[in-house]
Amino acid sequence: MATTQRNEPIIIIGGGTFGVTTAYHLSKQGYTNVTVLDRFPVPSLEAAGNDINKVIRTEYPEPLYTKLASDARDLWRDVNGLFAGLYHPSGWIIGATDRSTPFVEASARSAKALGVEPPQLISTEEIHKKWPPMNGDFKGWKSYWSPNAAWVNAREGIVRMAREAQRGGVRYISGDAGHAKQLLYDENQVCIGVKSADGTTYYGGQIVLAAGAAAGSLLDLKGQIVAKGHTVGHIQLTPEEVEKYKDMPILDHLEGGILFPPQEDGIMKVGAIHFVTNFARSLNGKSLPRYRSDNPQDGIPDIIEARLRKWMETCVPEIAHREWVETRICWDGDMPDYHFLITPHPTHKNLKIAIGGSAHGFKFLPVLGKYIVQMMEGRLDPEVAEKWKWRPGTKLADYETNPHPETPEDLNDMPGWGTIKSTL
Ligand SMILES: Cc1cc2nc3c(=O)[nH]c(=O)nc-3n(C[C@H](O)[C@H](O)[C@H](O)COP(=O)(O)OP(=O)(O)OC[C@H]3O[C@@H](n4cnc5c(N)ncnc54)[C@H](O)[C@@H]3O)c2cc1C
Ligand SMILES: *[C@@H]1O[C@H](CO)[C@@H](O)[C@H](O)[C@H]1NC(C)=O
């Protein structure tokens, strides 16, 4: 077991969800020389975690995540804690048509087994009665109601955690100086540091790769992680509509889309579940994120938008065709089995990896860093370490454990995208 010196220099690449929780927990545990490098200042423009809201749910088919999510939720909703005021217990309706039904049912079983109130089947009539503005025909919905789910102000969660880490002595570096371009190794292939876009080099006793969906641009991940883009749009409601929709639950159809209750300012977020990859425009057979920061002319794929609008008609027809006030493709790194990749690198000593949010990593923000620090110190519970280990060639999860089993389409195959000149 590695006994780590609390004053050893540690470099974290990426200050999104996994990076900031690592920095925070390192500082809480007395580490005194921690540096976070990110392309962008907090909250990073391109971080998956930088979002107006994210779902916090405790229903998972696997006890490991049910437990982690429950622990995280206790901190999210602690009115005296770091995240006070960010937690909104809206509940949610989770729907499926066919292929996603096993996931919902397995989650309900697991909740029951753990003594958590399981999601209950709910009819369209009951939905209409309970939430009159949700007056679509809910065609294709097998709907479950769960009062356990909530949404949080994700961006503010990251900002608060970063601020607290900085108070604890963590140094943040952004811009070209924080934009990692290359990992540095000694002659024995030990990872010793990072070189950034402006040529600055940073040396550390441990280097933590937490660059999310972009991690594959710095390290050969042996095909383990695929960057997937989630199409997101915001619409603006009037104050009268906010009043009307404010008590609605989150609506999540695993084959259709996800819709959040309005924020105070009337912004409503809608997300597609039809993800995209970016293989064709990346190098070496990888799918890497295509950030709008590098491609300011990028929009969202028309096909996906059309599907999303059609899906909204099934639940909230009145606002299904509102114009977007903002759109985005938000990138996350997906593992095929959707377990995280939180592990030492198998051959490069001192290189630690904390990625693979797999479209569900945000909710764990308050607690995940504790486990990442345990991994760094070589004392992660072996059962958990087994799930999060380096594992090229891992098979796709089955329908019971994967909420998003669909094969994503590549951006380059989307009409309108083939004509956009790649900057890569
Ligand atoms: C649209 C969308 C909705 C989601 N909804 C939910 C939800 O409701 N609930 C939930 O639990 N999870 C959700 N997720 C998943 C969750 O957001 C991610 O799993 C999680 O944020 C991943 O964290 P990360 O730290 O790996 O990546 P990120 O949060 O993306 O952070 C990566 C960071 O690395 C930085 N970076 C990248 N390249 C470099 C470089 N070369 N040098 C320096 N810095 C670099 C980036 O700027 C960024 O700050 C959602 C994801 C998306 C995309
Ligand atoms: C942190 O580590 C770096 C690299 O070894 C060193 O140059 C720096 O002085 C250290 N800073 C502190 C506060 O210990």
Image (spheres, rainbow, N blue to C red):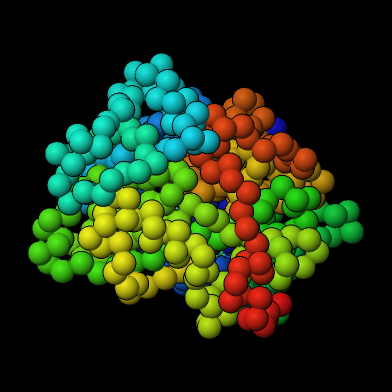
Q: Quadrant of the C terminus?
A: bottom right
Relative image position of residue 182 (x, y in whole percent): 74, 68
Nearer to us in this view, 321 or 106: 321
Q: Which of 387/139 is in front?
A: 139
Residue at x 31% of width, y 39% of height: 93
User: Residue 175 location in percent, x, y?
Assistant: 55, 78
Q: Residue at x 65, y 81 (%)?
A: 419
| Residue in view at x 43 percent, y 49 percent | 256
Is 59 placed above or below 110 here?
below
| Residue sticking out furthest to the right | 187
Q: From the viewer's perspective, is residue 343 above or below residue 332? A: above
On the question of residue 281 being in view, the answer is yes
**Residue 52 picture location, percent across and down:** 34, 61
Number of callouts: 0
Q: Where's the N terminus, which quadrant? A: top right
Which residue sits at x=48%, y=52%? 273
Is residue 57 something one can see in this rendering? no
Most foreground residue, 54 or 206: 54
Asked if residue 401 lies left or right of residue 422, the reply is left
Occupied quadrant, residue 129 = top left
Query: What x and y, as percent, mark residue 178?
Result: 59, 72
Does 252 sit above or below residue 15? Answer: above
**Nearest the eye: 277 or 66:** 277
